[in-house]
Image: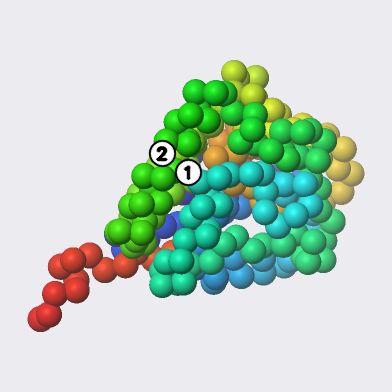
Amino acid sequence: MQFIEVTERAGVRSAVVRFHHPDSPVRFLLYPMIRLAEAAFYREVTDRLRRDCDLVVAEGVGEVAPAADPLVDSWARLDSRERLGLVVQDVDPGTLGVPVLHPDAAGAGGQDGHRGLPLRDRVTLGALTPAVLAGMRLFGTRRYLARHLTTENLLNETGRSEREALPGSENPVLGSRDSLLVEALTRLHDTASGPLTVGVLYGAAHMPAAAHALTGLGHRAADTEWLTVFTLDPGPHDDAPH
């Protein structure tokens, strides 16, 4: 299942996926998040969570910014972000007016994900970050950012190994955090006594684990709606005079 995609016409898009179970009163809405986007994307997600959800399961331990990600943090500090017309993720679960559950609060992994990465991944990330940042400063366009923020369902360059880390895998960071997320979703499925719509507000790299868990519980993806994260800037041929 694809959660983030890039198309020439629509730009970077995030899939809002609705899961339902024929014999359960609980409905789950998955909101795959990306750390840099147009402000309109975050406003739309915030409005939908307030309007459509009775409870939100959110990444992080109660703060707007989730687990540490040096690459994303560095992108967020780039002076060019204003020129690109993008903002850092600002969906604040505490302002939604509905109950919020933070599974990450139950484990240390949610508080410092990067520190728990295997040494090989930390070395790779440390070597990669300056190169990506240099590229953003030299060639900082939305197209460049889209290439480095999204690869299938991924948000960052560390996601390649994270994507494979479903619960029980060898990755100690995403695997442990996914396990906490899966436990929370399973508990809601098992204990709900009446109609309940649950919004899942997590980075897109975590969504395969959530979808896998819900499918295992008998839920099915009922429908998918795509939201624009940001449109792409014109290519060189589009800038040429006519």
Q: Which residue is mark 2?
A: 128
| Between discs 2 and 1, the one toward the N terminus | 2
Q: Which mark is residue 181?
A: none
Q: Tell me what residue is drawn at x 72 percent, y 67 percent.
A: 51
User: Toward which corner of the image does residue 127 lie, by quadrant?
Assistant: top left
Q: Position of residue 187 (x, y in %)?
A: 82, 35
Q: Position of residue 233 (x, y in %)?
A: 32, 67
Residue 41 visible in rendering = no
Q: Nearer the viewer, residue 11 or 223?
A: 11
Residue 192 visible in rendering = yes
Q: Position of residue 80 (x, y in %)?
A: 42, 66
Left or right: 112, with 205 as reference point: right
Instruction: Look at the picture and state if 63 lies above or below 174.
Output: below
Q: Which residue is mark 1?
A: 156
Q: Tell me what residue is drawn at x 66 percent, y 44 percent.
A: 67
- C-alpha span from label 2 to label 1: 11 Å
The amino acid type found where label 2 is placed reads: Leu
Q: Nearer the viewer, residue 92 or 10?
A: 92
Q: Mark 1 falls on what kind of element?
A: loop
Q: Tell me what residue is drawn at x 65 percent, y 36 percent.
A: 113
Q: Tell me what residue is drawn at x 41 percent, y 72 percent.
A: 83
Left or right: 49, with 154 as reference point: right
Badge count: 2
Q: Mark 2 falls on what kind of element?
A: helix
The amino acid type found where label 1 is placed reads: Asn
